Image (spheres, rainbow, N blue to C red):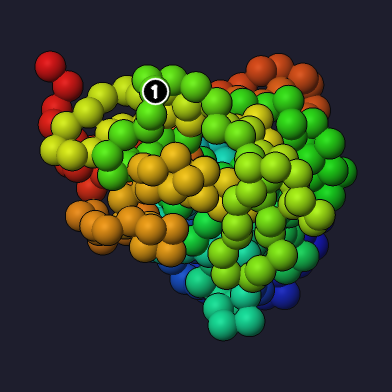
């Protein structure tokens, strides 16, 4: 709850707002006015020069916060959906989901926490990590707004549909099928795939379907049945068709100057009302250009 401020002496509205909330940028305060977030004696006021009188009560209504401005989010990040329980974004490649020892500030988590604190006018607002995408992977990424929602989503994660697109070198052995193996995630920087059960390794299942070929590459659609670290990348490499740009797992080329893996869609049941929702992010242009256009 944002405390209501009492006006001590007559003055215009904008100077009072800037003095009452000194931690908020001037452009953000003007957005409050523009989008009807400011209340004077419980009435919406949008004029910056509205005359205040001593004893007037001024408050901010978080529910009227404007959508994020381009400057509030890093280049390439966009919000696909937001409600009281969840926040869904398109994460650009090159951005971590959450901080590491070497990078603590420029992460999806930190940007969205700052966004929530700005839009809710609260220094305690934050997001919760539900799942992660590799730094090199772009696409749909889901966050929770409360710990209870995070827990509910994670408990049902296996039942949600996670669809990826990858541009690979060469082609898989068949037009469709299932990639099976056991992933050893014990090393911090890469994983290892085994064809038989091995102590410490977990089973990994990925369903794939070839969408089109061209220029020595193939666009493959993948649906995860399990969610192991680097699962898609190591399984495609084992199948003889590593993801383009993924030198860590054997790719010989890097035509897009990035790993050509994209989280294209996520289908979930909403953790509050149970309705089915699908969030989608189209294949980025730099990956679409790696194959001929569809006829």
Q: What residue is shown with label 1?
A: 174
The correct choice, above or below, for 171 with respect to 119 in the image is above
**Residue 225 spot, x, y in % from top left:** 65, 30
Which of 183 and 76 lies nearest the eye of the viewer? 183
**Which residue is located at x 62 percent, y 64 percent?**
98
Q: Residue at x 84, y 50 (%)?
A: 147
| Residue 151 found in image quarter | top right
Give the crowd class for mark 1: few <14, some 14-19, many >=20 residues within 10 Å. Answer: few
* Closer to us: 282 or 201: 201
Q: Is residue 83 left or right of residue 243?
A: right
Residue that protrudes farthest toward the bottom in the picture = 102
Residue at position x 48%, y 46% in the image:
238
Q: Does residue 118 appear left or right of residue 290 in this picture?
A: right
Is residue 54 shown above or below 264? below
Quarter of the rendering occupied by the N terminus: bottom right
Camera sees residue 99? no
Residue 274, placed above or below residue 77: above
Residue beneath the point at 18% across and 39% down: 216
Task: Return the x and y of residue 41 as percentages of the image width and height.
Answer: 71, 50
Frontmost residue, 221 versus 148: 221
């Amino acid at each position: 709850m944002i405390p209501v401020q009492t006006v001590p002496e007559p003055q215009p509205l904008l100077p009072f707002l800037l003095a009452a909330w000194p931690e908020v940028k001037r452009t953000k305060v003007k957005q409050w006015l523009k989008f009807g977030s400011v209340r004077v004696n419980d009435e919406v006021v949008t004029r910056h020069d509205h005359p205040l009188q001593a004893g007037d009560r001024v408050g901010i209504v978080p529910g009227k916060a404007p959508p994020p401005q381009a400057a509030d989010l890093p280049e390439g990040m966009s919000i696909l959906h937001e409600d009281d329980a969840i926040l869904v974004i398109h994460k650009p490649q090159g951005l971590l989901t959450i901080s590491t020892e070497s990078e603590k500030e420029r992460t999806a988590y930190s940007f969205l926490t700052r966004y929530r604190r700005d839009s809710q006018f609260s220094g305690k607002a934050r997001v919760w990590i539900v799942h992660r995408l590799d730094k090199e992977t772009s696409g749909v990424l889901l966050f929770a707004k409360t710990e209870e929602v995070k827990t509910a989503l994670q408990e049902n994660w296996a039942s949600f549909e996670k669809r990826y697109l990858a541009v690979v070198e060469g082609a898989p052995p068949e037009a469709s099928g299932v990639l099976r193996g056991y992933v050893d995630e014990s090393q911090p920087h890469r994983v290892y795939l085994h064809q038989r059960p091995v102590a410490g390794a977990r089973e990994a299942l990925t369903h794939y379907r070839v969408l089109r070929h061209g220029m020595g590459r193939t666009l493959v659609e993948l649906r995860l049945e399990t969610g192991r670290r680097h699962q898609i990348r190591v399984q495609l490499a084992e199948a003889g068709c590593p993801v383009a740009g993924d030198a860590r797992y054997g790719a010989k080329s890097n035509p897009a100057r990035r790993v050509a893996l994209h989280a294209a869609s996520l289908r979930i049941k909403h953790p509050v009302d149970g309705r089915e929702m699908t969030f989608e992010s189209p294949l980025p242009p730099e990956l679409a250009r790696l194959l001929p256009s569809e006829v």
